[in-house]
Image: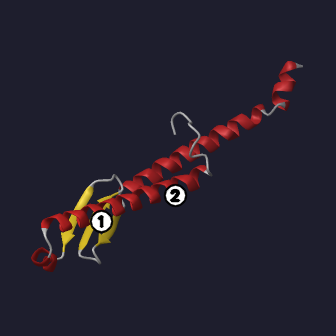
Amino acid sequence: MAKGRMNGMGGGNMQGMMKQMQKMQADMERMQKELEETNYEATSGGGAVKAVVSGEKLVQSIEVDPDMLKEEDAEIICDMIAAAVNEALNKASSDANSKMGSLTGGLGGLNIPGL
């Protein structure tokens, strides 16, 4: 009788749930790899400074309009570089959160070991 109750309590659903979790984990790994391979670009100073970062949050390149080097002082240029890099990093984080959130269906705050 106890055996029949276990099946009646959804024991068969556990296998389906495990398969869903495995699929979600595979999807998250694929998404993480895709995010790591994506570059994010941002500009500041009206386009005078451009920063590109990877999804791994590493700076890939910094470009400064040569005209800015003649007109502006170093402190302003450094501020614009920092602003462009920070904006590119924010884009990378936002994209990662959005894509991972779409996979987990809003379970982002749930701590599931192995995921």
Frontmost residue, 32 versus 6: 32
Q: Position of residue 57 (x, y in %)?
A: 32, 53
Q: Left or right: where does residue 67 sit relative to residue 38?
A: left
Q: Helix, strand or loop at disc 2? A: helix
Three-letter amino acid code at the position of disc 2: Ser
Q: Position of residue 23 (x, y in %)?
A: 58, 46
Q: Position of residue 12 (x, y in %)?
A: 76, 35
Three-letter amino acid code at the position of disc 1: Ala
Rendering quarter of residue 10: top right
Q: Residue at x 29, y 71 (%)?
A: 44
Q: Position of residue 76 (x, y in %)?
A: 20, 67
Q: Residue furthest right?
A: 1
**The N terminus - image quarter:** top right
Residue 84's disc is 1
Q: Left or right: where does residue 12 sit relative to residue 50?
A: right
Frontmost residue, 46 versus 115: 46
Q: Which residue is mark 2?
A: 98
Query: Going from the N terminus, do you reach mark 1 or mark 2 first?
Result: 1
Mark 2: give few (<14), some (14-19) or many (20+) Cα within 10 Å: few
Q: Residue furthest top?
A: 2
Circle 1 or circle 2, nearest the eye: 1
